[in-house]
Each structure stands twice: as structure tokens, then as C-alpha cells.
Image: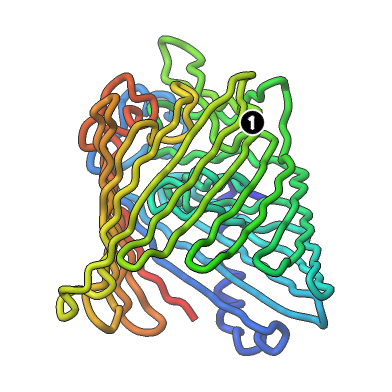
Amino acid sequence: MKKHSKDASIFSLIIGIGLSTNAVYAESIFDSVSVDLAATSRFYLQDMDSNVQTLQNNQAKPRKLSYGSRLELKFNHKYQDVKFGARILGNWDKVDIERRYVDIREASAYKSWDDISVGGGIDTFFWGVSESINLINVLNQSDVIASLDGKVKLGQTFVSLHHRIFNGDITVYYLPTFRERSFPQRPSFGGQIVHTSIFEDDKKRGGIAARGVFYHNNVEFSLGYFKGTRRDPLFIKLSSKQAQLIPYYLQTENYLFDGVYLGTDATYKLEIKTGKEQSKGFFASNIGIEYPIFSLPTILQDLVLIAEYVFDDRGNTVESHGQNDIFIGTKFELTSSGNTQVRFLFSYDFDYKSQYAEISYQYRITDYVRIKAKMMGVLKDSTNDLRLHPLANEEFIKMSIHYAF
């Protein structure tokens, strides 16, 4: 599904542009067609670590500034009781060959009979309610080439059975394949990631999963289960003299819960993940609150204050940098028209005193054109923090301008 081929990536972009110019014809075949074509750029505030650069001397020299292009195509069609969907992504980067790829994020079909439906193919699924780290979002592999926060996902092969009940729905999944994570040249995660991975017990399983979502008055909650290969790998150093890292994937069993309570003055959120890894039990949670502010309507629209606390007792095998961390932030729109959207998030680690911050910005110029920007940085780190320390010199700013229709 992924090809590290410059020629293939350029070819896909040319095909995509051709399809976009014939969108009217495509809409006569599909129920809906959308195209998002973007010019992208990424600027790193510091040079790459010299040890990592030495290992990557067979590739284009990593630079502080790189630029490229991105194309996303979406198609949807319904034939009788069957819904078809497809989403294809093509990306090209001037410097980083790992950012040159074509990927199928969705190619699925769903058939319905009254309250029952079955599905199959490739799709992306989102589980969770938190703003910072979604602990229970476990089905899809994260696309760290696109984003470090785990919000962007790769497609996952699946077969599903869905049953709608009077106050919610229940779905079971069979995931036949596992996708290894792909890593760009930068951020380097403290070393060069080799392409050969190791799996616990030599098992490489997509897994099985189930989830029930339920509604009652102002409460929405879900119960879930997952068993298979953990999507987030650990990193093993191959040599004490060289900064080469090999991904190591654990087997995991998860019991999952997430819930939202819509209060009169605030929204309360909770995610819990517990289970077993390496024959040991673990517990992780994210508890948060979102508080809207209505006192500045002429300046800021939809202003929301965010506070979340993330705890994970897995120590060195934790899946994210949220192990004993508090996240605070905000999201808002600058004008009543909603042209400008801003989101800010800051985290502080009570164990290692590490600090992390990110800010994202989006401005809609017209109905078809918008600008996106995001900056992330490790403000303070500790060598004992295995998640944030490798990113200490990898702060970057990325910008893109999108034409979508």
C-alpha cells in the first residue's frame, strides 16, 4: 500500500491533478468527489544531529527547509444498500525520500440490513474523546510522517459486523493484517530508524476488536476490547557506537472505556485503557475538562479552555509522552465568520519536568483556499524521558496552502 518511489509518487500526483480537472465527469459516476491539493513546507529550527546525518549519508542531505506537494482524493458512492468509499493520498517532498509515497487510506464497502450492517476493505477508525492523547484509539497505525500527535492514521484492513440497538450500537472487528510504522528522516527520534522490525514472539497480527457505544441523556460512553500487535513500537539501539534504532512491537490486550458528560457549564471527558503486555498488567487514563468562555464574543468565537491529566504506569514501555503529565490549552476562532481557527496545547511532566508545546493555525481565504500552519517544540527535557528527549532538537514549523473542492 505504500511505495517509497519518487516516480510513483509524481505519477500519482499527475493522475490526481488530471482527475481533479475532470471532477465534473467523476461526479457523474460517484455520488460525491472531493479533491485537496496542497503545497507544503517544513522548517526545522536546528540542524540534525551529526551522528544521525552520518548514518543517512546515502540519502539526500537533511536540511532545515524542505518543501513538497500533497494530493488527497475522496470518492463516495451508494448502490442500493451498499455504500462504497475511497480515499487516496499522494505526497512528495524535495528532500526526504520517506515523504514520497502513495497510500490508500480508505477503500471500503458497507452493506446494511435494517439494524445490521457488515463492512470490509480498508478504513480509518477514530476512538476516543480527549483533546491531547487518545489512549483508546488503537485500531489504526499512526502516520508520524504527517503528524506526531497520533491524530493522523494509516488505513487498516478490516472486516466488521455492526448492530444498532435502541440506545447505541455494537461493532466487532477482525483485522487481518498489521502495518508497520513508517518514519521520516526528520524528526529523527534520536537516531536512524532501520526498516527491519522485531515482533514479540515473532507475531505480527492485526488483531481482533469490539466496541459498544451507548447514549443516555447528557452522557455518551463506550466499552471496547482489542487484542493484537501494539501499533506504537519501542526502539532498540543496535549499537552503543551508532545511533541506529530498530522498532520493536509488543503484543497487547486492552480493555477500553471512554465517556463524555455534557454539563451545564463544562464538558467532562474520560479515557481509560487497562490490560496486559509482556505478561504484566497496566493501567492508563486521561481525565479532562473543557470549559467554554462566552464573555468575549466580539473578539473570540467558540473559545474553549482545555485541561487534561494523563497517567500511564507502563514506565519505559509507555506508548506516548503522557505518563504523569498535565496538558493545558485552548482552541478558538478569531472572527465570527470562522475564517481563523487556533489551537494551543502545553504539557508538563511531573516525573521528568519535561515541557512540550504545540500551536496550530488555520485561515480560510475563500471557500476553496485555506492556509494551515503548525509549530511544535520540546521546551525542556530530561535524558530519562525516553519519549520527549529524542525530539529535543527536532522542533519544526510546517505550513501548507490548500486548494480543495
Q: Nearer the viewer, residue 152 or 103?
A: 152
Q: Is residue 1 above or below residue 335?
A: above
315 displayed left or right of 337: right
Q: Is residue 394 visible?
A: yes
Q: Is residue 290 above or below residue 256?
A: below
| Secondary structure of the residue carrying numbered label 1 | strand
Task: Look at 53% across and 46% down and name the residue there.
Answer: 142
Task: Look at 29% across and 78% down and name the residue there.
Answer: 339
Measuring from the top left, give residue 45's x and y in whole percent. Answer: 23, 42
Question: Label 1 crowding class (10 Å Cα cut-off): few <14, some 14-19, many 20+?
Answer: some
Q: Nearer the viewer, residue 76 or 354?
A: 354
- Residue 83 lies in quadrant: bottom right
Residue bearing the label numbered 1: 252
Task: Look at 26% across and 37% down and name the residue there.
Answer: 348
Measuring from the top left, give residue 95's x and y in whole percent. Answer: 41, 46
- Residue 249 lies in quadrant: top right
Q: Is residue 44 visible?
A: no
239 displayed left or right of 108: left
43 displayed left or right of 136: left
Color encoding of the figure: rainbow
Q: Nearer the viewer, residue 143 or 297?
A: 297
Task: Look at 60% across and 72% down and name the residue there.
Answer: 74
7 displayed left or right of 285: right
* Amino acid type at image mark 1: Thr
